[in-house]
Image (cartoon, rainbow, N blue to C red):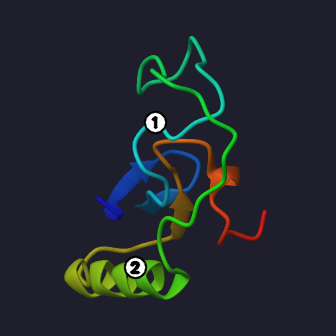
């Protein structure tokens, strides 16, 4: 799932989530990770989604939930966000 929500947040209000990293594509295996243990850690960066595809998905989701208020868009990947070559981090 690339875009989900809106999810209610006490801090942010209603937030759309963007998951721009494949499941557990991660450089760590943090004990506190809500996704569980990372079976194979990696530091190899990859190209996962085109920025245009992410933007199109966000626009489609906003259209689908038009009657709900969206306050923020947050990136909440299922892996390490800095491993995406196409992100500007």
Report the residue at 40% width, 42% height from top. Answer: 23
According to the picture, the residue beneath numbered tag 1 turns out to be: 24
User: Is 55 drawn above or below residue 17 in the view shown?
Assistant: below
User: Is 32 drawn above or below residue 6 in the view shown?
Assistant: above
Q: Secondary structure at mark 1?
A: loop
Residue 79 image offset from top left, x and y in percent: 53, 41
Q: Are marks 2 and 1 in contact (CB under 8 Å)?
A: no
Q: Secondary structure at mark 2?
A: helix
User: Is 60 drawn above or below residue 26 in the view shown?
Assistant: below
Which quarter shows the N terminus?
bottom left
Residue 78 image offset from top left, x and y in percent: 46, 43
Q: On the rendered structure, is 80 left or right of 48?
A: right
According to the picture, the residue beneath numbered tag 2 turns out to be: 58
Circle 2 packing at 10 Å, graded few (<14), some (14-19), many (20+), is some
Residue 68, quarter of the rendered image = bottom left
View extreme (right): residue? 89
Which quarter shows the C terminus?
bottom right
Precedes in sequence: disc 2 or disc 1: 1
Report the residue at 42% width, 50% height from top. Answer: 22
Report the residue at 56% width, 66% height from top. Answer: 47
Residue 12 image offset from top left, x and y in percent: 56, 55
Q: Nearer the viewer, residue 62 or 53?
A: 53
Q: Nearer the viewer, residue 14 or 41?
A: 41
Q: Nearer the viewer, mark 2 or mark 1?
A: 1
Q: Which mark is residue 85?
A: none
Residue 4, quarter of the rendered image = bottom left
How far separated are the C-alphas under marks 2 and 1? 22 Å
Residue 40 image offset from top left, x and y in percent: 51, 25
* Number of marks present in the image shown: 2
Circle 1 packing at 10 Å, graded few (<14), some (14-19), many (20+), is many
Report the residue at 45% width, 62% height from top. Answer: 18
């Amino acid at each position: 799932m690339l875009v989900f929500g809106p999810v209610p947040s006490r801090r942010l209000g209603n937030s759309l989530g963007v998951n721009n990293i494949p499941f557990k594509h991660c450089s760590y295996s943090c004990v506190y990770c809500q996704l569980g243990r990372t079976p194979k850690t990696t530091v190899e960066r990859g190209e996962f989604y085109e920025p245009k595809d992410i933007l199109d998905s966000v626009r489609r989701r906003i259209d689908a939930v038009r009657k709900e208020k969206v306050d923020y868009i947050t990136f909440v990947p299922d892996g390490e966000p800095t491993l995406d070559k196409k992100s500007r981090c």
